[in-house]
Image: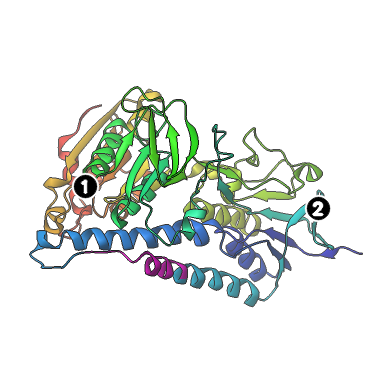
Amino acid sequence: MAAELFDAIVVGTGQAGPALAARLAGAGQKVAVIERGEFGGTCVNNGCTPTKTLVASAYAAHLARRARDYGVKAGKVSVDMKRVKARKDAIVAGSAQGVEKWMRGTKGITVIEGFARFSSPTEILVGKRTLQAKQIFLDVGGRPLVPKMPGLDEAPFLTSESMMDVGFVPKHLIVVGGSYVGLEFAQMFRRFGARVTVVEMGPRLIGREDEDVSDAVREILEAEGIAVRLNAECLSAKKTAGGVSIGLECKDGAPRVAGSHLLLAVGRAPSTEGLGLDAAGISTDKRGYIEVDEALRTSNPNVWALGDCNGKGAFTHTAVSDAEIVGDNLLEGAQRKHTDRVPVYALYTDPPLGRVGLSEQEIRKGGLKALVAKRPMSRVARAKEKGETLGFLKIHVEEGSRRILGAALLGTGCDEAVHSLIDVVYAKTPVDEFRRRVRIHPTVSELLPFVLDDLRPL
């Protein structure tokens, strides 16, 4: 059968693929979009959209239990997980259907459902169909990583994806993995009513963050009744009559923890297996991520990799940026690079952590001379008014240039407040200029200039 010819082929409909496909089609190109599962990718189906919907329900339950703190009388609070899940499912379905409708309704785009596999550097097989194009874009995403842990072949476990199907409150949820995904699930299910234990192999939670951030997040979670076990250096799983138990071999605490359910949240892996990358001459690293240059082009000059599968961000916002970089370079002759991006992300525990630029440990590692300023959220008027004073605001400044290098904002509204600093970090704005700008009262963002009153050597 003769190959079907296209100007471009987009494999996957995560956060990068659809936007790029629509842009190419708008420029007059004939585009094929291939999807093997649900439209919308990880973010829409089992990432940002469902988890933040669940976080919102968990926050509502938490706030209802605290009603008396605000002078509000409320009865006994209970959580109907079936309704919580139904709300999440409805929002997810609406988002996924929206992406599919967008792709199918865009002039110049042909949607093809099925598994894509390279048969040559410019050809892709989907079932019995052969598609050919000089431009191919991979947006195939990632999946939860299942570690090589003794006993997992017999012990039942959940991942961040299968956890989306849970319509009940576990009696005791053991979360293996004390980083971003694991901590969000730990707190939300604790607020839904589960007993929760977080098990982390490292010496502290969210090891990528500065030690004061890790310590503060741990204190916040433990104050809600979440047990934290660190230094779990030799994990093993075992099926029990009541569910599952985990062998820890921690330096402190009992050697095993027994629970009703086990959630593995130890990272993600790229969904690149079965794509026939060898046939296309596309190189991957030892973890399976597709290797790309600064413009996101692979070792095959006809192919680009975007989103989670390239290992250059693993966030929705970096995937969107990937699509913009490639689109600008191809259609406008720009010379954009993913390496020009400033790191920015959030941890959606409550309160959330907003992060931009360099952390304290990154500054020290880079040998930069810097200053640091820090203020507890208990000294932020907006936080006191809301009755949510946990956390702190921390900003790093380069000593000589006085430009802001980065920040860690842990507190109510800090996932939004951090945006006040993003453009500042990109523009290398000096502290004095940043402080002159008037901000709205009462907000968390208005305090950021005043945090800088207390700059001290790092």
Helix, strand or loop for disc 2: loop
Q: Residue at x 32, y 63 (%)?
A: 57
User: Is residue 139 shown to the viewer in this render?
Assistant: yes
User: Which of these two is toward me, 423 or 358?
Assistant: 358
Say how many tags the image has: 2
List the single residue furthest toward the front: 241
In the image, 318 versus 39, the foreground residue is 39
Q: CA distance from mark 1 to mark 2?
A: 51 Å
Tell me, yes or no, whether the highlighted magenta stretch contains residue 80. Answer: yes
Q: Is 39 within the magenta?
A: no
Q: Nearer the viewer, residue 233 or 43?
A: 233
Is 140 placed left or right of 317 in the picture?
right
What amino acid is found at the position of numbered circle 1 in the picture?
A: Leu
Dot 1 falls on a residue whose secondary structure is helix
Q: Quarter holding the N terminus? A: bottom right
Q: Is residue 209 left or right of residue 127?
A: left
Question: Looking at the image, which residue is at 32% across and 36% down?
Answer: 228
Amino acid under disc 2: Thr
Instruction: Give the main secondary structure, helix, strand or loop, of the magenta stretch.
Output: helix
Nearest to N terminus: mark 1 or mark 2: 2
Residue that badge 1 annotates:
448
